[in-house]
Image: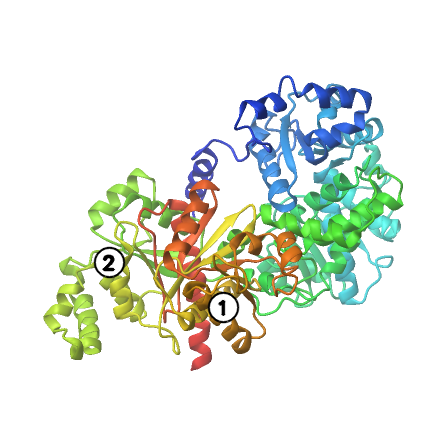
Amino acid sequence: MNSNKKKLAALKYHAEPTPGKIKVVPTKKYDTQRDLALAYSPGVAEPCLAIEKEPNDAYKYTTKGNLVAVISNGTAVLGLGDIGAMASKPVMEGKGLLFKIFADIDVFDIEVDTKNVDEFIQTVKNIAPTFGGINLEDIKAPEAFEIERRLKEELPIPVMHDDQHGTAIISAAALLNACEIVGKKIKDVRIVVSGAGAAAISCTRLYKSFGATPENIVMTDSKGVIRKDRGNLTSQKAEFATDRDLNTLEEAMKDADVFIGLSMADIVTPEMLLAMSNDPIVFAMANPNPEIQYDLAVSTRKDIIMATGRSDHPNQVNNVLGFPFIFRGALDVRATAINEEMKKAATLALAALAKEPVPEQVNIAYNKTKLVFGREYIIPKPFDPRLIGEIPVAVAKAAIESGVAQEPINDWEAYKQELLGRLGNNNTLLELLRDRARQDPKRVVYAEGEEIQVLKAAQVAYEDGFAIPVLLGRKEVIEEIAAEIKFDLSEVEIIDPKSKEEKHRKTKYATHYWVERKRKGVTLNDAESLMRDRDYFGAMMVNTGDADALLSGYSRSYSTTIKPILELIGLQQGIKRAAATNLMVSDYGPLFISDTSINIEPDAKTLAKITQLTAETIRMFGVDPVIAMTSYANFGGSKHINSAKVDRCVQFLHKANPELVVDGPIQTDFALNNDMLKERFLFSKLVDKKVNALVFPSLDAANATYKLMKELNKASSVGPILMGMEKAVHVLQLGATVDEMVNMTAVAVVDAQEKSKREMLDR
């Protein structure tokens, strides 16, 4: 995507459909006058009086214990510099979003319009009673050091300047692991730090705390090497001044073991890398462009361990690996501070996690056969679901051991399970899906290219880099609509199946179709006529390999749209009936619902096949299936034919697929509420498991359930995902939203990736 497209996409994302990225939502019932009387006057007086007597009761009766302030004055925003408090607000909202989706922490973003240190500190102190923690953000050095130091001394809640400590913690974990891989000790390595701002100072201090020798550290700024004989040094720079006879970055890099870049793009040359010692460790963390480009660095030194701040290269040093989980642990023990012991605990936990076997979900998301601790995997990936179960625990333990915790934790296993349960609130599965699609974008045919909503979905998928759209329809109509939504079609293929220009392709497709179906009453003329239909034409594009995937159904009924797909594409080997599942993403977490679109009244055998296909689809998302076979009765509670059908299906699956976690017949509430299940049906295979799929005995039950969830619970729906097909073809629900079509595009791309792999294995 060119820079202008990125600019327009970013502005549109922040403006629509609601300005901004975060909002406040009620956590209590407010349906009746009684609810409102308890929420406000007169009922609210009781917690007020309780807190007046015991201030710590604010944690009991208000959101204080899960509320963090993200505070900035806008003096050092990302790579934009001093842009002011108001202009920093989108970044602070973004930080709030990350807190919520990764650690289920609520945030108010606060933009303070002052550069005066005393005024800023006083403002934060005045509003501090509202919050359980303070995250300082994008404040320039050296003021940032003074602000953080004083607030930590004067406030009884955790305070952390993430720009300093976030990068320090993540990079320190990476450095410890990199040193281990190359067989060097941190006390012996010679370190060059490019940059002397808040992040660089904090990083270097943390490296020292882990054993880096001060005499082995050289720090540079825009004037060159920071030497002891240089005048007018700040106290922070003086702390790292060297007495070695070095003046330039180039001189400092000679025989260095480690380069830490927190400065600006392209200041490191290949010659500098070649001058470093064997097995150099290079963390070029300037954003968005590193001190030396990744490809240039790894082609210059084959023995290099390279990390950047970018997600499109291995070893991304990303602060999101730290701050949400550090604050989570600090809040959960009601810590009075985030101290050095807690930061070091987070560092060691991150370093250790990188050495553990990587969940298949993460391998799939990053399109890797198997991520293994080594030169291209020295720190965990940002979407690793284990992070929330490991980092907060380490931080909380360190808080308790160092004496800053006010609410000790006694049952650590229960706490870890509680943390993992919070994953249901962030639903990173969709982003993992898109990330995986970006690894290998596929050509996706949009059969209804003249529909503005379909074009909007194709635009998002294209500009986000995970699909290559092929639009079917009249070129002049599509171009007119595209101009209206500012969709640059200069590199997008548009095909009108009815145009004379496509005569050759239509003839090829018609002949192919006729050969396949000439003994089923189809003539060549029939076939040529059908190829004017966009669904038939699109299906033939996929069938002949001219495209990888097909999406249709936005403007037509499901039954009308699926007919040509079933005729032309066919089923996977060994599959006799297709099926469909919908992925629902809600506060509960990912939940697959089957069969929502194909099989109206499946018998026990068909229901078993639907379940097997659902399990296969869930694994495609990198998740282990846990499936409940639903009914109106529990485990033989009814002998009616409908419940008995489910019972026979479960018995078959237990024999045919003993490795599959599946059980039933079971009522939906028991399937989703493990406490209820354990109390009544302790024998069930679903006990102590989180169900992620519901298979219903009939289409009307499954379809009604997913649509109820979508409308009443505002769950995001991804689907219907067509299962059992030979090619990646999917039929949208009539009137699907843009978001639903975007998500289905990602599904179609990932499905095409999987089917491509299968084809290669079969050859």
| Near-viewer residue (587 or 120) | 587
Question: Can you give x and y, in whole percent of width and height, for residue 731 in the image?
Answer: 33, 58
Q: Quadrant of residue 606?
A: bottom left
Judging from the image, what secondary structure is the residue with disc 1 in? Answer: helix
Residue shown at 70% from the left, 18% from the top: 45
First along the sequence among labels 1 and 2: 2
Judging from the image, what secondary structure is the residue with disc 2 in? Answer: helix
Q: Quadrant of residue 232?
A: top right
| Residue placed furthest toward the left | 525
Q: Which residue is mark 2?
A: 560
| Residue placed furthest toward the bottom | 763
Q: Which residue is mark 1?
A: 647
Cα separation, mark 1 vs mark 2, equals 33 Å
Kind of residue at disc 2: Thr
| Near-viewer residue (350 or 114) | 350
Question: Can you give x and y, in whole percent of width and height, for residue 375 in the image?
Answer: 68, 65
Mark 2 Cα-neighbour bin, 10 Å: few <14, some 14–19, many ≥20: few
Asked whether, in this view, residue 177 is left or right of residue 725, the answer is: right
Asked whether, in this view, residue 533 is left or right of residue 622, the answer is: left
| Near-viewer residue (620 or 166) | 620
Viewer-side label of 1, 2: 1
- 226 vs 662: above or below: above
Q: Is residue 123 visible?
A: no
Quick one: quadrant of the C terminus?
Answer: bottom left
Kind of residue at disc 1: Asp
